[in-house]
Image: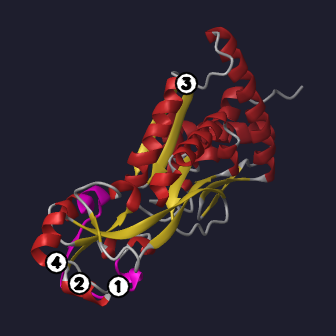
Amino acid sequence: MRRLPSPDDLLILLTVARLGRFNAVAETLGTTHTTISRRILALDRQLGGRTLERSPHGWELTGLGASAVAAAEAIEETLGSLSGLISDDRGGLSGLVRISTSDGFGAEFVTPALVRLQHRHPLLNVEMLSATRKVSQNRSGVDLEVVVGRTDVTNAQTIFLTNYFLRLYASPGYAAERGLPETLDGVGQHGFVSYVESALQVAELGHRSSQLPMPKSSFQATSIFAQVEAVRRGAGIGLLPNFMVAGKPEFVPVLPDAFQRQLPIWAVARPESLRSGQVQAVIAALKEEVDQRQELLAG
């Protein structure tokens, strides 16, 4: 009789399918890249074929691998039910979930959503990686990406979370000393605060794509928090997310009726990740957070 594949190896395959990289899986499971590779090879031998194939987007499942992952998901669900019985918490989530998100939205929306989720599920561990970039093609070893702008992906699913606005702001001190422009052309006579264009992956966040005139001088930073602070301290006019500064006395709207930019925010994940209870819970928590704070996002 052919020996059944190891449940542990099946669960490792499931983690590879979700994260896409052996290194990320090894780090998540507290082992080594070599061990993960060896366990996958052992599983392939037991199943009589390859479960994974390398692509430009990371490791992808073969047809056999997809069938094996379905079995792994059933094992995961059963173990989750057993864990709930042991802990007397049938609805509890545990394990590690990794999320990549942009700085500003991550701090203002993702963080409170995840903290609230952890309060409900104390055994759930969270790793949040901050990066303002376009959607990854290989998921970069995370369960879920939260990204701004266009999402041109072929091996993942996208879930719309919300829209938000970029608007122009200055500090009251800067406005009193330099005055504020009365037209969009007048913005070119002022200092301008924005992202470092040469390092920016999301073009929609930059000054060049805004069709605003070239500024007299610029202060560029890769961190949105540094940009907000630079505007607050009078470096110039900044193109800032409204949810970070709207309604705060340290920031004065500039030409609010003449210029604004609306951008979408998406959650992106592999199909295998989206079937994870932890990832589903994170997405639900994010939707709850943005639904409750739509006034701020639109403000």
Q: CA distance from mark 4 to mark 2?
A: 15 Å
Q: Which is nearer the N-term, disc 1 or disc 3?
A: 3
| Residue kind at label 1, given as amino acid type | Leu
- Foreground pick, 32 / 76: 76
Disc 2 residue crowd, few under 14, some 14–19, many 20+, Cα 10 Å: some
What quarter of the picture does the C terminus occupy?
A: bottom left
Q: Which is nearer the N-term, disc 3 or disc 2?
A: 3
Secondary structure under tag 3 reads helix
Q: Residue at x 61, y 11 (%)?
A: 87
Contact between marks 2 and 1 (CB within 8 A): the answer is yes
Q: Which residue is mark 1?
A: 212
Contact between marks 4 and 2 (CB within 8 A): the answer is no
- Foreground pick, 188 / 197: 188
In this rendering, is residue 62 above or below 254? above
Disc 3 residue crowd, few under 14, some 14–19, many 20+, Cα 10 Å: few
Instruction: Give the mark toward the camera: 4 or 2.
Output: 4
Q: Residue at x 50, y 67 (%)?
A: 263
Counting from the top left corner in percent of width and height, residue 51 is at: 73, 47
Q: Which mark is residue 179?
A: 4
Please state the extent of the stretch shown in magenta in the rendering: 207-228
In this rendering, is residue 20 above or below 72? below
Secondary structure under tag 4 reads loop
- Foreground pick, 49 / 194: 194
Q: Which mark is residue 215?
A: 2
Q: CA distance from mark 4 to mark 3?
A: 50 Å
Q: CA distance from mark 3 to mark 2?
A: 48 Å
| Residue kind at label 3, given as amino acid type | Arg
